[in-house]
Amino acid sequence: MSHDESARGGAGGPAPLILTLRFDEAAFARLDALRRAHFPPERNLIPAHLTLFHALPGEAIEEIADNLRTACAGTPPVPLTFTGPRSLGRGVALEVEAPPLLRLRRLLAQHWSPWLTRQDAAGWRPHVTVQNKVTPEAARALLEGMAAGFTPWEARGEGLLLWHYRGGPWEAAGDFPFLG
């Protein structure tokens, strides 16, 4: 089986897992509204999200869930600052500043290092994609429009969400609230 098949749960293997941040309700509503307004509707299969890991091994779900319960039990809700839009070339993301989240992700990455794909092992810049897979001109227009009136805003990360990825909309696999 190729790495791509494995990453998608092909050839009968377990679906890979995606780990995202759970936002406070107001932040999620604001971000999801931006995504619905600017993401091509035919490609917008999932709600707004901030991905920490793109492809953890599905066969290790029990160990991953145990690790997340332990990590989240000692982690208080995480303050987030949305600092501004940035170009993705064919889309736009909102950059997120969150030092405690960076530390938590670094800890999890060290623990899970044997499992990490090249993408998940590489540097990580927290962001929420509000537009993707559009023309560079459309992306540039949204970037300029968002940047012109952008004021940084605060939000809160309230936990971590684990998802099964099977090629379409994600399927919930776990919710781990920050309890510290």
Image (cartoon, helix red, strand yellow):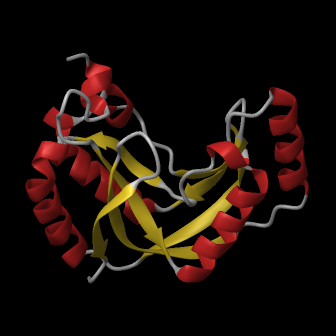
Task: Please give left or right for residue 11 compared with residue 39 in the image.
Answer: left
* Residue 58 in the image, given as x and y percentages of width and height: 19, 45
Residue appearing at x 77%, y 51% in the figure:
38
Residue appearing at x 17%, y 35% in the figure:
13
Decide which of 103, 120 is in the foreground and name it. 120
Decide which of 88, 147 is in the foreground and name it. 88
Q: Inspect this view and state whether residue 132 appears.
A: yes
Task: Please give left or right for residue 132 compared with residue 53 in the image.
Answer: right
Vertical comparison of 41 with 32: above or below: above
Residue 122, picture quadrant: top left
Decide which of 52, 122 is in the foreground and name it. 52
Residue appearing at x 46%, y 51% in the figure:
169
Task: Please give left or right for residue 5 compared with residue 64 in the image.
Answer: right
| Number of numbered discs | 0
* Residue 162 in the image, given as x and y percentages of width and height: 31, 59
Vertical comparison of 149 with 13: above or below: below
**Quadrant occupied by the N terminus:** top left
Residue 149, picture quadrant: bottom right
* Residue 18 in the image, given as x and y percentages of width and height: 34, 49
Vertical comparison of 22 with 120: above or below: below
**Quadrant occupied by the C terminus:** bottom left
Q: Inspect this view and state whether residue 74 appears.
A: no
Task: Please give left or right for residue 88 compared with residue 55 in the image.
Answer: right
